[in-house]
Amino acid sequence: MENRVKACRERMGWSQGELARRLGVSRQTINAVETDKYDPSLPLALRMAKLFAAPVDQLFIDHWTGEHSE
Amino acid sequence: MNATVDKKKIHTMLWRMIAGAVFGAAMTAVFLLIFQPRMDPGDPSHMIAIIAGISYLLIGLSVGIGLVAPNAGSRFLNVEDADELREERPKLRSGAIACALIGIFLLVLALGPDGGLLSRAVTFWFAAACLAGVIIASFMSRKTDELTRQITLEASAGTLHIALVVLAGWAALAELGYAPLLSPLGLVAGFAMLELIAIFAVSATKGLMTPR
């Protein structure tokens, strides 16, 4: 899943370590999310959205259109 | 990220893997040279326990050394810089202790009485202390990061599935007399080894083995 975590973090002027500290996760987790290696849990995604004051669907972009969508 | 950086990262990853494999193989060879003459050649359990024990001990020691000397540790552990090791010290410390104790537990049981290293009673107390230490260290690190928790969950599920297949095959062969019987120590060491392989496999499939 594509995400804009890195762009949001850089806009806030935070390092990966700073964002990790604010979210209570490891720097490795932030790195893995930013490089699309790991999709965060829903609670972590919601916390990120809250921290960046951005809607979750703008922070995490799912290109799925739906099999039966019209 | 450009191609030169990618190539450099792949080289770093390969060198780390080769160095770890060579060091682990050398240590295993030394142990086997010393203790193999005293082991039962028909029982592969001790061999499995030695290989698993050395693997766990080396991982625990390398993380431990990295935590004691973060500047040096950042060169051989897959972290961004020495500060990351300092930040993660509480979590990594208990993990490193647990890993080293699992290794010592397996090595002590494999080499204790049969290897002529320790008496049966001393081996028992040594193994019990290691096991207690593993439980305490695991309890200390229960507040793990969600990525670590996810990797552990996936690796444990994978281990169970692979173990069931491997054990089913081995049970069939042993029942028919085509394979040697495995002692409880061999079973535990086998599970520990599979868990380790599964953790590396899950980490690799998530791209977490690539140097950062």
Image (cartoon, grey):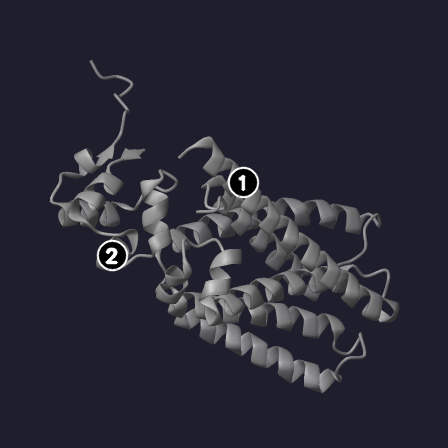
What kind of element bears circle 2?
Answer: helix
Residue B41 visible in the snapshot:
yes
Rate crowding at label 1 as few (under 14), some (14 to 19) or many (20 or more) other CA atoms within 10 Å.
some
Q: Position of residue A50 (x, y in %)?
A: 14, 48
What whole-number distance in Å separates the C-alpha atoms at marks 1 and 2? 28 Å
Compared with residue A5, is residue B130 higher up or lower down, i.e. above or below?
below
Residue type at mark 1: give it: Ile
Q: Position of residue B55 (x, y in %)?
A: 63, 60
Q: Which residue is rendered at x = 41% and y = 63% of the image? A: B85
Compared with residue B136, is residue B43 higher up or lower down, i.e. above or below?
above
Q: Chain of mark 2?
A: A
Write down the residue under mark 1: B10
Residue sitting at the far front = B4
Q: Position of residue B101 (x, y in %)?
A: 57, 72
Q: Which residue is rendered at x = 64% and y = 44% of the image? A: B165
Q: In which image quadrant can residue B45 be found?
A: bottom right
Q: Which residue is rendered at x = 67% and y = 50% of the image? A: B167
Do the residues bearing badges 1 and 2 touch, measured as CB atoms within 8 Å?
Answer: no
Rate crowding at label 2 as few (under 14), some (14 to 19) or many (20 or more) other CA atoms within 10 Å.
few
Q: In which image quadrant can residue B105 be found?
A: bottom right
Nearest the camera: B90 or A67? B90
Residue sitting at the far left = A53
Q: Which residue is rendered at x = 63% and y = 81% of the image? A: B126
What kind of element bears circle 1?
Answer: helix
- The lab-note entry on whether marks 1 and 2 share a chain reads no
Image mark for residue A18: 2
